[in-house]
Image: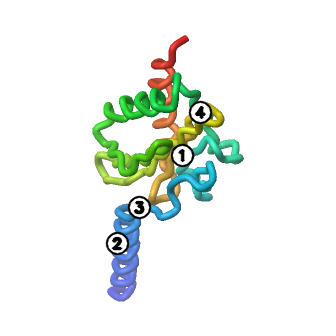
Amino acid sequence: MKLLVSFIVSISTAVIVFMVAKNQTQPKHLGIDQGHLAELPSSPNAVSSQTSIDDKRVDPLPFIGEKEESMAAIKYILADYDNAEIKDEKNDYLHVVFTSPTLKFKDDVEFYFDEQHQRVDYRSSSRVGYSDMGVNQKRYEEIKEAYLKRKPS
């Protein structure tokens, strides 16, 4: 019995160490590659405006005026989130990390400002776990609502 308990504790510890390490490591596949955000994981804890998977697809956001105005609007919205930190910013791209308040899980959120199509593509994915209980989808909906309120009629 002691051997079984020891085994279970060892496995549990290894899983926790793995999850903590993965949660602290920024994925290498993020960014824009020829106008495309990275593919989504097979787990349900991600959404994107560029995926063909129906239950993970969200709409891209239309530009508000020029690219710079759209980026400024997104950055303004992000400033209202205490748990959001911009990690990378280019002239057509933002990478933001959201950290959950209690367990400190990290989600990578990306915005691609596509001038050719006058839209903002969106990708959000949890670093660890399988299900996010709809957090990435809900965050997208909040950002979309705030963004579209800024769009002139």
Disc 2 is placed on an element classified as: helix
Judged by depth in the image, the label closer to the viewer, 1 or 2, is 1
Locate residue 4: give its quadrant: bottom left
Question: What amino acid does circle 3 point to?
Answer: Gln
Q: What is the CA distance from the residue labelled 1 to the residue labelled 2?
A: 27 Å
Question: What amino acid does circle 2 point to?
Answer: Val
Mark 3 or mark 4: whose residue is earlier in sequence: 3
Question: What amino acid does circle 1 point to?
Answer: Arg
Residue 95 at x, y percent in the picture: 43, 48
- For the point 57% across and 31% down, the residue is 61
Residue 141 at x, y percent in the picture: 51, 31
Quadrant including the N terminus: bottom left
Is residue 94 toward the left or the right of residue 114 in the image?
Answer: left
Is residue 13 toward the left or the right of residue 94 in the image?
Answer: left
Q: What is the CA distance from the residue labelled 4 to the residue labelled 2?
A: 40 Å
Mark 1 and 3 residues: CB-CB less than 8 Å, in contact?
no
Q: How crowded is mark 4: few (under 14 residues within 10 Å), some or many (20 or more)?
A: many
Q: What is the CA distance from the residue labelled 3 to the residue labelled 4?
A: 26 Å
Mark 3 or mark 2: whose residue is earlier in sequence: 2
Residue 24 at x, y percent in the picture: 35, 63
Question: Label 4 belongs to which residue?
Answer: 119
Q: Is residue 28 above or below residue 152?
A: below
